Image (cartoon, rainbow, N blue to C red):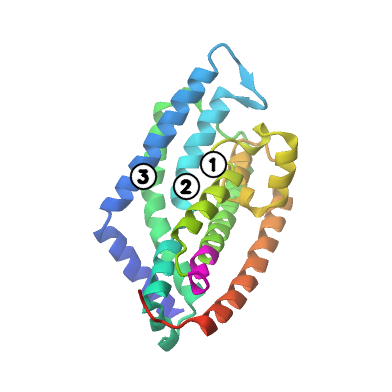
Amino acid sequence: MKKYWTVFRVNWQNALQYRGPTFISILGNLLHISVLLYLWNAIYLGEQQLGDYKLSDLITYYILQLMINSMVLSYISWELGEQIAEGTFSNFLVKPLNPLHYWFVLNLSGKLFEGLLVLLVGGILSFILINHVTLPSEGMTMVYFIVSLILAGVLAFEFDFAIGILAFWLVQINSFKYMLQYGMFFMAGALLPLDLFPEAFQRIAHLLPFRFLLYFPIQIFLEKEAQPLEGFITAGVWIIALYLILQFGLKRGIRRYEAVGK
């Protein structure tokens, strides 16, 4: 564990040193959410409720989306794919590090730093809109919400790592990554709550694990999730299954790896 703690500490220091891109990313997400809030405020003019959502529910939904995007969703596939394509992934073959565990720790340290910043931004935004947000009425709701965020973070990393190791089989994966990531975010409820879609779409989304990345944690916070414990078990099963698949895929990918570079 000492070597992984060293990785965590070094990357944390690196995040502190190069914090500019993190601020820019958060500001970009904040602008995106602000546009959505303005749009929904216009849609709700003259309407009290849309589906199961009051305006305050949707404002809360998108503020939480801003926070979860920064705290949970992973983007390590870009660097991982580049290392495989350029041949620098060879460093892992001569070091006592499991690439999956290494990238998990690296992602965790970056997300904790970014999470602290986005909590500050989200807190300020919530304070400004305090009369227009929905807060939990039960203390256990926050406990369930935190657990759901932890599970979402692990799942998001596993999905992103899976996209990254596709570089073992595909020469150019950037376009493919865009398609997979946007599809994943859409099915996670990033653009619109999943229960506002047609019923057939909701059934498909419920069978897939992507809802645990955004929609499930937000539903818990809004106290609209009737069976959070059942959701935790389902998410846990997905995490274990994906971990085993990733370890298998990593071994197969390393066998194909030629380190020829670009």
The image position of residue 71, as x and y in percent, is: 46, 51
Q: Earlier in the sequence, mark 3 or mark 2?
A: 3
Q: Residue furthest top?
A: 46
Amino acid carrying label 3: it is Ile
The answer for how far apart the CA atoms under marks 2 and 1 are is 9 Å
Do labels 3 and 1 touch, CB within 8 Å? no
Please say whether residue 76 is visible from this viewpoint.
no
Amino acid carrying label 2: it is Asn
Q: From the viewer's perspective, is residue 180 above or below residue 169? A: above
**Left or right of residue 173: residue 10:** left
Do labels 3 and 2 touch, CB within 8 Å? no
The image position of residue 114, as x and y in percent, is: 38, 52
The image position of residue 258, as x and y in percent, is: 45, 83
Which numbered dot is residue 26? 3
For label 2, count other residues whose C-alpha is less than 10 Å away and answer few (under 14), some (14-19) or many (20+).
Answer: some
For label 1, count other residues whose C-alpha is less than 10 Å away and answer few (under 14), some (14-19) or many (20+).
Answer: many
**Image point (32%, 51%), residue name:** 22
Q: Earlier in the sequence, mark 3 or mark 1?
A: 3
Amino acid carrying label 1: it is Ala
**Image point (63%, 63%), residue name:** 239
Give the residue number, with chain letter if any, for mark 1: 190
The residue segment tinted magenta is 162-170
Q: Earlier in the sequence, mark 2 or mark 1?
A: 2
Residue 166: within the magenta? yes
Do labels 2 and 1 touch, CB within 8 Å? yes
Instruction: Give the quadrant of the C terminus.
Output: bottom left
Q: Nearer the viewer, residue 54 or 34?
A: 34
Please say whether residue 13 is visible from this viewpoint.
yes
Q: From the viewer's perspective, is residue 239 above or below residue 97? A: above
